Amino acid sequence: MLVTVNGERKEIAAGNLTGLLGEMEFEGRHMAIAVNYRVVPRLRWAKTALNDGDQIEILTPRQGG
């Protein structure tokens, strides 16, 4: 299916957020995720189904100043 991740169109095989993170090699990092502009709590990542055309933002904290 085609989704947009951080502004970039991607063809993915994953059916949920946990699968997407594994597919994109984001496992085990601190991050926040929004699907279609709604933040998804970490406990719901495995249960959050992805659909064709979804807009996904994966945000990771940065340090600096």
Image (cartoon, rainbow, N blue to C red):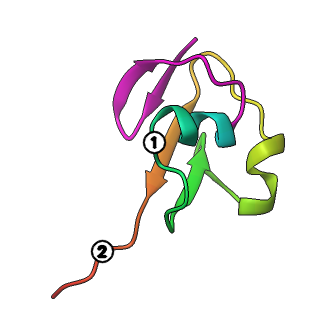
Q: Residue 24 at x, y = what percent?
A: 45, 36
Q: Please identify the residue farthest to the bottom as the structure is shown.
A: 65
Point 78% across, 44% down: residue: 46
Q: Quadrant of the N terminus?
A: top right
Point 47% across, 46% down: residue: 57
* Res. 57 visible in picture: yes
Q: Which of the numbered marks, if any, corresponds to residue 5?
A: none
Could you tell me the amino acid type at mark 1? Glu
Select label 1 or label 2 by which is in front: 1
Q: Please identify the residue farthest to the left as the structure is shown.
A: 65
Query: Which residues are the magenta region?
Result: 1-16
| Mark 1 element type | loop
Q: Residue 32 at x, y = what percent?
A: 55, 62
15 on left or right of 11: right
Q: Is residue 8 magenta?
A: yes
Could you tell me the amino acid type at mark 2? Arg
46 on left or right of 4: right
Q: Please report whichever mark, 1 or 2, sits nearer to the chain's N-terminal start.
A: 1
Crowdedness near tag 1: few (<14), some (14–19) or many (≥20) residues, C-alpha within 10 Å = few
Tell me the CA gap for discs 1 and 2.
18 Å
Q: Disc 2 designates what residue?
A: 62
Q: Disc 1 designates what residue?
A: 25
Crowdedness near tag 2: few (<14), some (14–19) or many (≥20) residues, C-alpha within 10 Å = few
Q: Quadrant of the C terminus?
A: bottom left
Location of residue 46 with respect to 51 vertically, above or below: below
Location of residue 61 with respect to 33 vertically, above or below: below
Front residue (pair 28, 65): 28
* Res. 41 visible in picture: no
Q: Is residue 24 magenta?
A: no
Point 71% across, 33% down: residue: 16
